[in-house]
Image (cartoon, grey):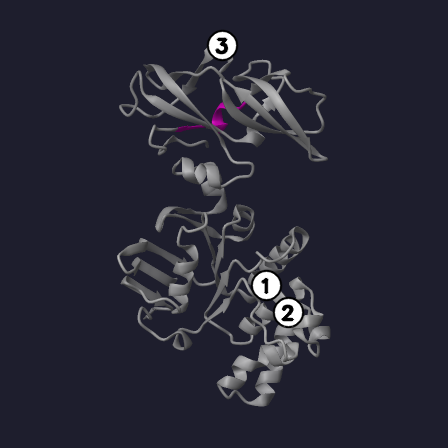
Amino acid sequence: MTFLQLNNIQKKFGEMSVIKGVSFSAQKGEFVVFVGPSGCGKSTLLRMIAGLEDVSDGTLSIDGKDVTYEEPAKREVSMVFQSYALYPHMSVFENMAFGLRMIKLPEDQIKARVLEAARILQIEALLERKPKALSGGQRQRVAIGRSIVRNPKIFLFDEPLSNLDAELRTQMRVEIAKLHRNLGATMVYVTHDQVEAMTLADRIVVLRGGLVEQIGTPTELYDRPANTFVAGFIGSPKMNFLAATVDGVDGGSLKLSHPAFAGGSLTVASDTAGRVKTGDTIIVGMRPEHLTLDAANPVLTLALDISENLGGSTQLYTTGGGEPVTLVVPGRPSLNSGDGLNVGIDASHIYLFDAAGQALRASH
């Protein structure tokens, strides 16, 4: 059942168009993540769902009800912001109870809801503390708890982990995933961090310049990116791209040339019948983690610039035909700057895009 529905949502500030026609739907209990670079419109879109920004055009419905022009308080949504926005003079209990007191909920129900939220978030021992006595992670738990007590139809998260250090971000990411599993609630989460998107989402909405580039599960976006933007945004380190020339089209295969290719050329299977011709430019994509060293039948010949020891793996920054190529390989290979590398890749992991960056063939 469609629980959240956006149809051609648009947002303008004066003559400037920020959201340019976004449509998508979410099922009840689904965890949807909006991801994209700064300025792509993801937070604006979230605020429109919350009712904190007016909709310039289009329609928005929650649980079958049109709420396009409904007041925020009547939408039954709850939002967790990047800043914790806690009242410094109130205890944790009072911060979590404040919204319920504003709607004049009976005191026994307020206490029951706050205690249950505190149990879920494992902050029972913090209820009498003031925000200044809490760590960043604890403050964010309180902010989330303040949302839980309202029993909203949809939880909205606006980059809630941005203020935390790396270790706390990882910890809180796990906590939010557990929270979603335990509550079974519909959640919409905004982040610019593709790792958060990949690990939390049931489905990801990739945004750029106020438009949707692709919607899909994390696996779909990783394995079958619609274009070079999605391919480069999803995955860390980002996908390598080499602009090759089509030297020949032979039935179900393409012969491509680029100085980084072993022997200067590469033949790949392709289902691009009629879409590619000799002389065209093709962008070849290869993920760093799919590249292998010391290949018997190398696809790339590269020169090592620098290596980074990551403990269990090593990140290699290389150059091929004047273009940068990054590899992630297991262990700690003994290599020096300037070394030549024979690099292989399984053919199923080679991505092809046209000159405009649109996918011609995705792996798998």
Distance (Cα) linking label 1 and label 3: 53 Å
First in residue order: circle 2 vs circle 1: 2
Image location (x, y in percent) of residue 267: 43, 16
The quadrant where residue 61 appears: bottom left
| Lower position in the chain sequence, tag 1 or tag 3 | 1
- Tags 2 and 1 in contact by the CB under 8 Å rule? yes
Question: Magenta includes 192?
Answer: no
Give me the C-alpha separation between circle 2 and circle 1: 8 Å
- Spot the residue most to the top: 263
- Magenta stretch holds residue 347: yes
In the image, what residue occupies the spot 54% across and 21% down? 319
- Of the 4 image quadrants, the one containing the N terminus is bottom left
Q: Can residue 361 be seen in this view?
A: yes
Quadrant in which residue 14 is drawn: bottom left
> Which amino acid does the dot numbered 1 rest on?
Leu
Q: Is residue 122 left or right of residue 82?
A: right
Disc marking residue 263: 3
Tag 3 secondary structure? helix
Residue 262 location (% of width, % of height): 51, 13
Which residue shows up at 58% across the image and 69% down it? Answer: 143
The reply, left or right, for residue 225 in relation to residue 101 is: left
Instruction: Report whether residue 113 is seen.
Output: no
Q: Is the C-beta separation of discs 1 and 3 under 8 Å?
A: no
- Dot 2 amino acid type: Ile
Q: What residue type is labelled 3?
A: Gly
Count of all numbered marks drawn on residues in the image: 3
Instruction: Specify the segment rendered in magenta.
Output: 345-352
Residue 177 versus residue 132 in the image, above or below: above
Q: Name the residue under label 1.
A: 179
**Disc 2 element:** helix
Label placed on residue 120: 2
- Which image quadrant for residue 10? bottom left
